[in-house]
Image: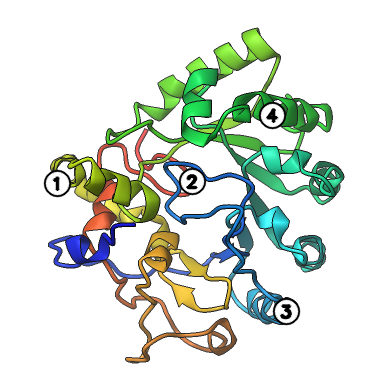
């Protein structure tokens, strides 16, 4: 795999600083039942990295003694962590909001068939990857048969009240472009998704979140292999909207890797660019309590243009309507 950090480190991205912390985005491990082409984590079935119960207890202690209101659980497939249900139940007891970044098909894996009901019982918000509403495009990006399995999982979630009018169980879908292009306008694409999925498959959901593909890990390496890296970076830079820098997710979020170390965002985690506090080389979740991080500078590189290009992109979707 081609390393992209050397191509990104020399940057003219504008400096940004932290605001108040409200979200811990927790990578529970890199193991996944899929190996998607756009995956910036390079996750897959053969990855073995997994967050321990001890580290989970450390982050729960920090989350409940700080300004944090939300745990955003990601991976890999976060549900494959053996302590996933323990973490969710403990966080809900502490009145924390939970987001599960789910690839949908993992809900059908052997031994995980009760996971959807568990998520519903704990009122976990599901943010589910479905990079297109067309079967061929999804299977091309995520593997043969993935689309049909995703629809089956969506039917299961709908039957539990997710994505249904009047229900508090929120189901959002995530769109990623098929190649080195920016996502189309989020609101218009959401209407296309809702219409097609309802008419063709009787699937409903709450919101569509459009995410820009990051030029790192598997997707970045593919760009380099195809000679498209420079052109894609030129697209991101030429589409930069400075107003988006006030809304990027790293201002109110900390990313935590499977070992408990802290990063300004999930993308910096994948580039091994740790969060900097008091000139320490890296910071562990167990050291966060009591530290003042507001107004600290955020570590940036050229990949940050992926979050500010066009309508903007974050884990919550587009920044500008």
Q: Position of residue 316 (x, y in %)?
A: 49, 46
Q: Residue at x 28, y 56 (%)?
A: 304
Q: Secondary structure at mark 1?
A: helix
Tell me the number on the disc at residue 149: 4
Could you tell me how far apart the alpha carbons at marks 3 and 1 are, in whole angstroms? 43 Å
Q: CA distance from mark 1 to mark 4?
A: 36 Å
Residue at x 56% of width, y 12% of height: 196
- Label 2, on which residue? 316
Q: Secondary structure at mark 3?
A: helix
Q: Is residue 110 above or below residue 283?
A: above
Q: Nearer the viewer, residue 5 or 310?
A: 5
Q: Is residue 307 visible?
A: no
Specify whether 293 is left or right of 59. left
Q: CA distance from mark 4 to mark 3?
A: 33 Å
- Mark 3 residue crowding within 10 angstroms, few (<14) / some (14–19) / many (20+): some
Image quadrant where residue 79 sits: bottom right
Q: How many marks?
A: 4
Q: Quadrant of residue 23?
A: bottom right
Q: Nearer the viewer, mark 2 or mark 1?
A: 1
- Crowdedness near tag 2: few (<14), some (14–19) or many (≥20) residues, C-alpha within 10 Å: some
CA separation in Å, label 4 and label 2? 24 Å
Q: Earlier in the sequence, mark 3 or mark 1?
A: 3
- Which residue is under mark 3? 57
Mark 1 sits on what residue?
Answer: 230
**Can you tell which quarter of the image residue 147 is in?**
top right
Q: Tag 3 or tag 4, which sits nearer the N-term?
A: 3
């Amino acid at each position: 795999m081609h390393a992209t950090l050397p191509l990104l480190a020399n940057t003219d991205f504008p400096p940004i600083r932290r605001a108040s912390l409200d979200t811990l985005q927790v990578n529970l491990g890199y193991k996944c039942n899929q190996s998607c082409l756009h995956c910036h984590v390079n996750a897959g079935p053969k990855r073995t990295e997994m967050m321990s119960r001890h580290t989970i207890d450390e982050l729960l202690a920090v989350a409940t003694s700080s300004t944090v209101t939300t745990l955003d659980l990601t991976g890999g497939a976060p549900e494959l962590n053996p302590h996933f249900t323990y973490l969710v139940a403990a966080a809900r007891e502490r009145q924390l909001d939970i987001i599960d970044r789910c690839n949908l098909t993992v809900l059908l894996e052997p031994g995980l068939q009760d996971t959807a009901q568990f998520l519903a019982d704990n009122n976990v918000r599901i943010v589910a990857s479905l990079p297109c509403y067309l079967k061929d495009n999804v299977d091309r990006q995520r593997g043969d048969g993935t689309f049909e399995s995703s629809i089956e999982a969506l039917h299961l979630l709908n039957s539990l009240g997710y994505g249904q009018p009047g229900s508090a169980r929120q189901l959002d879908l995530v769109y990623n472009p098929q190649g080195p292009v920016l996502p189309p306008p989020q609101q218009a694409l959401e209407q296309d998704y809702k219409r097609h999925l309802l008419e063709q498959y009787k699937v409903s959901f709450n919101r569509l979140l459009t995410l820009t593909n990051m030029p790192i890990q598997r997707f970045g390496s593919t760009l380099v292999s195809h000679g498209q890296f420079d052109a894609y970076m030129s697209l991101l830079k030429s589409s930069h909207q400075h107003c988006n820098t006030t809304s990027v997710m790293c201002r109110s979020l900390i990313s935590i890797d499977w070992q408990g170390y802290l990063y300004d965002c999930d993308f910096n985690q994948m580039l091994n660019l740790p969060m900097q506090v008091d000139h320490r080389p890296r910071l562990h979740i167990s050291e966060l309590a009591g530290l003042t991080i507001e107004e600290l500078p955020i570590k940036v590189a050229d990949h940050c243009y992926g979050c500010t290009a066009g309508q903007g992109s974050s884990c919550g979707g587009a920044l500008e309507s």
